Image (cartoon, grey):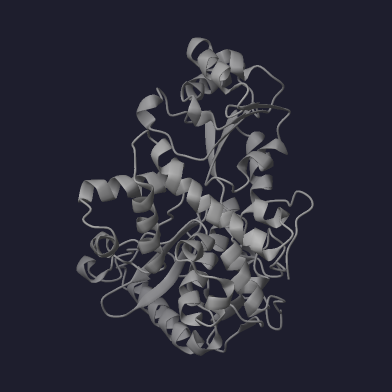
């Protein structure tokens, strides 16, 4: 199945953005390059300023230095694309929101985070920040969306038995290799769709990693770091492990240099590390605290390692790690309307949960990722053991959190159902 997008496909962030524009003066949308920030913002804007316009960029930047408020003139909501090219616009927007005392005035988009020293004021109360990711399987119309993650939080006992995913393993692998890049869906062939992420990585390595803060970085070293991250995808590999892996392929790298490159990739929203969850179930020394290595999109790991759909189809063990990255991306998108956050749990006694999905109201779910059915039994045992330990500590007044809303295993399989022990089996191709 080749998904070919001929029109704008609605994103989950569309409703969030529309609602936010009714509550606050300005919105800033951040996220990786090519994830669709500008296209989505244009659906809600009545005028647009594109600072990267090659014919006008120089004059725009000059005017920003002299009179930034002039660049804000236009019908509202006014979109200011790649605003970080002129950081002074942040304070100009904040001041304008103060003076006009209205909502829905400006939408700012940017593909890099900005050095806060270049901004005089935080914008708190005037500018709301939204993070946009690459497209989820539901947004690219590959998941049927028959099971809502948010509905599960609200109704943990909802009947999901018998709901089926139409996504085959071959289609799931291809979707992971292609990634959630909107432009890839405009391509008519699979080869062209896969090329988009390769081109994205080339841009990151050859220019963006240096342009993000003006520090010259070796493109090959950027590529080597991304390859090492990809080799350790979905694992809590330490920085020491990553550095050792890099040194095996690219001479020595000092810690300051390594962290400089990691900072650049983080600011570009390429790296998306998942923090460890530490609810004090165990002693502090028992909890593994290293962040789990992930990319903003699973296709980055695939392309960094030079893998293909065909090679992954014959190496499902490797694809299992890529699949976890895909699931984390989609869960982050599906829970974004309620400010969902993702962490993981692992301790030195072997107790673990691949994902802990937290909502802002304090609810959370314990989730495992299993590509096929073979790991479901062990995954369910892990979740139940962790759930029992949490409930025990709560009863002993040693833990001040809620009990998990539900336990689930997200799979690459076909059928959704609830096990006799209460653990929900959720095909990724059914979620939204």
Quarter-wise, where is residue 152 in the image? bottom right
Q: x, y (%) of residue 197?
A: 56, 56
Against 57, residue 285 (above or below) is below
Residue 199 versus residue 393: which sits nearer the camera?
Answer: 199
Q: Does any portion of residue 98 appear in the rendered image?
A: no
Residue 276 versus residue 1: which sits nearer the camera?
Answer: 1
| Number of dots carrying numbers | 0
Q: x, y (%) of residue 141?
A: 72, 63
Q: Is residue 251 left or right of residue 94?
A: left
Residue 89 versus residue 395: which sits nearer the camera?
Answer: 89
Question: Which residue is the extreme one toward the right?
Answer: 6
Quadrant for the C terminus in the image: bottom right
Q: Does any portion of residue 122 appear in the rendered image?
A: yes
Q: x, y (%) of residue 357?
A: 49, 63
Q: x, y (%) of residue 154?
A: 61, 64
Quadrant for the N terminus in the image: bottom right
Against 136, residue 91 (above or below) is above
Residue at 66 percent of width and 51 percent of height: 183
Against 115, residue 392 (above or below) is below
Residue at 61 percent of width and 42 percent of height: 37
Against 94, residue 212 (above or below) is below
Residue at 21 percent of width and 55 percent of height: 252
Residue 396 versus residue 159: which sits nearer the camera?
Answer: 159
Residue at 68 percent of width and 62 percent of height: 138
């Amino acid at each position: 199945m080749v998904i070919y997008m001929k029109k704008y496909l609605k994103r989950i962030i569309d409703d969030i953005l529309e609602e936010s524009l009714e509550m606050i003066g300005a919105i800033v949308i951040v996220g990786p390059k090519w994830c669709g920030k500008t296209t989505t913002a244009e659906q809600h804007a009545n005028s647009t300023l594109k600072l990267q316009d090659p014919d006008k960029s120089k004059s725009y930047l000059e005017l920003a230095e002299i009179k930034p408020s002039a660049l804000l003139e236009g019908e509202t909501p006014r979109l200011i694309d790649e605003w970080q090219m002129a950081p002074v616009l942040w304070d100009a927007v904040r001041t304008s929101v103060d003076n006009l005392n209205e909502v829905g005035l400006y939408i700012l988009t940017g593909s890099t985070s900005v050095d806060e020293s270049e901004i005089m004021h935080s914008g708190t109360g005037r500018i709301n920040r939204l993070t946009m990711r690459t497209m989820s399987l539901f947004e690219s119309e590959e998941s049927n969306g028959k099971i809502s993650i948010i509905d599960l939080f609200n109704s943990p006992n909802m009947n999901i038995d018998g709901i089926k995913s139409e996504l085959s393993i071959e289609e799931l692998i291809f979707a992971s290799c292609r990634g959630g890049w909107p432009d890839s869906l405009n391509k008519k062939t699979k080869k062209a769709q896969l090329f988009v992420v390769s081109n994205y990585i080339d841009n990151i390595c050859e220019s963006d990693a240096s342009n993000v803060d003006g520090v010259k970085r070796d493109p090959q070293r950027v590529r080597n770091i991304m390859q090492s991250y990809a080799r350790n995808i979905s694992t809590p590999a330490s920085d020491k492990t990553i550095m050792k892996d890099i040194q095996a392929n690219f001479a020595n790298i000092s810690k300051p240099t390594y962290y400089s490159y990691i900072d650049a990739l983080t600011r570009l929203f390429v790296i998306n590390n998942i923090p460890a969850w530490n609810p004090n179930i165990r002693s502090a020394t028992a909890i593994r605290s290293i962040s789990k290595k992930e990319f903003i999109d699973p296709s980055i790991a695939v392309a960094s390692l030079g893998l293909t759909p065909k090679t992954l189809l014959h190496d499902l063990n490797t694809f299992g790690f890529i699949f976890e990255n895909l699931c984390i991306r989609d869960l982050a998108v599906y829970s974004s309307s309620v400010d969902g956050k993702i962490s993981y749990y692992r301790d030195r006694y072997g107790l673990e949960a691949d994902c802990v999905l937290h909502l802002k109201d304090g609810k959370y779910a314990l989730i495992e990722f299993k590509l096929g059915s073979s790991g479901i039994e062990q995954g369910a045992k892990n979740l139940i053991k962790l759930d029992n330990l949490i409930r025990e500590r709560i009863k002993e007044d040693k833990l001040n959190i809620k009990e998990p809303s539900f336990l689930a295993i997200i799979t690459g399989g076909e059928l959704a159902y609830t096990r006799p022990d209460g653990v929900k089996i959720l095909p990724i191709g059914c979620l939204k």
